[in-house]
Amino acid sequence: MNPEWKSRYELAVDVARQAGDLAMQYFDTDFAVEWKKDNSPVTIADKRAEELIRAEVKKHFPNDGFLGEEFGDQDSTSGFRWIIDPIDGTRSFVRHIPIWATLLGLEYKDEQIGGVAYVPAMGLMYRALRGDGAYRNDKPIHVSNVDKLSDALLCYSSVGWFRKAGREETFLELAAKTQRQRGYGDFYGFVLVAQGSCEIMVEHGVNAWDVAATKVIVEEAGGRFTDWDDTPNIHRPDVIASNGKLHAETLQILNRVG
């Protein structure tokens, strides 16, 4: 295993836990909620958690870069970049819903090589390093073998995002072809695909920090992650994760026009 990758991955697991536990201290308290220009919420927990991650990483790898939801981009001179979502699911966090996670994605020269999703309210750590497999805590996880849409469980975030994208009808067509549908948004639908609990997570309206970590987790669990043009891209608002067996059929339906 590449020692530079491994050392950063081990640190990512550690600092994600620290940051998530810090955010958890605010979860059941009364805290102020600010609203950003894109009408998304942010709290002191988001900011402090990202500050913690950046500070700890800089101690060990001062030449690495960052892309974070709260504090933006910082160039790398090492080729490595840490992609941070301190609280993925802030809308759940502010409503005291426990489905939120601290996400850390690792890149080397624009390739996603590692991902961590720590879920403090559930005591779960999802993690993966390229070539090493995917894990929930210390248990290896793998996508399901379901190969028919009629037997599949479909996850998504919000129908409103598909309406904004002009894909509401095609999304509803996809939903109608599946056995069950669940609105497990944000990181959660992706890790459910990785652990074989659902077959498809389809999303619109994401940023790189929302999916950099979960992309690696899904792929190392044996699944596929692409945008709606079937490109393994984290810089588009439209993404799909699947067990692989249903990927092409799902994309065909989502891209049907008229």
Image: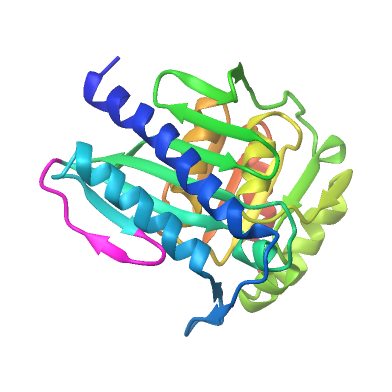
Considering depth in this image, is 207 or 75 the residue closer to the camera?
75
Q: Nearer the viewer, residue 226 or 52?
A: 52
> Which quarter shows the C terminus?
bottom right
Image height check: is 25 above or below 170?
above
Task: Give residue 47's position: percent from left, percent from top.
Answer: 43, 64
Say which quarter of the image contains residue 253: bottom right
Q: Residue furthest top?
A: 1
Image position of 89 with respect to 200: above or below = below
Residue 237 in the figure: left or right of residue 25:
left
> Residue at the location (67% across, 71% down)?
30
Residue at 33% in and 66% down = 71
Question: 100 left or right of 234?
Answer: right
Query: Splitting the image into 4 quarters, where does residue 139 fall?
Result: top right
Nearest the eye: 180 or 56: 56
Quadrant housing the N terminus: top left
Is 72 magenta? The answer is: yes
Check residue 188 for magenta coloring. no
Picture coordinates of residue 2, whole percent (x, y): 25, 19
The stretch in magenta equals 68-78
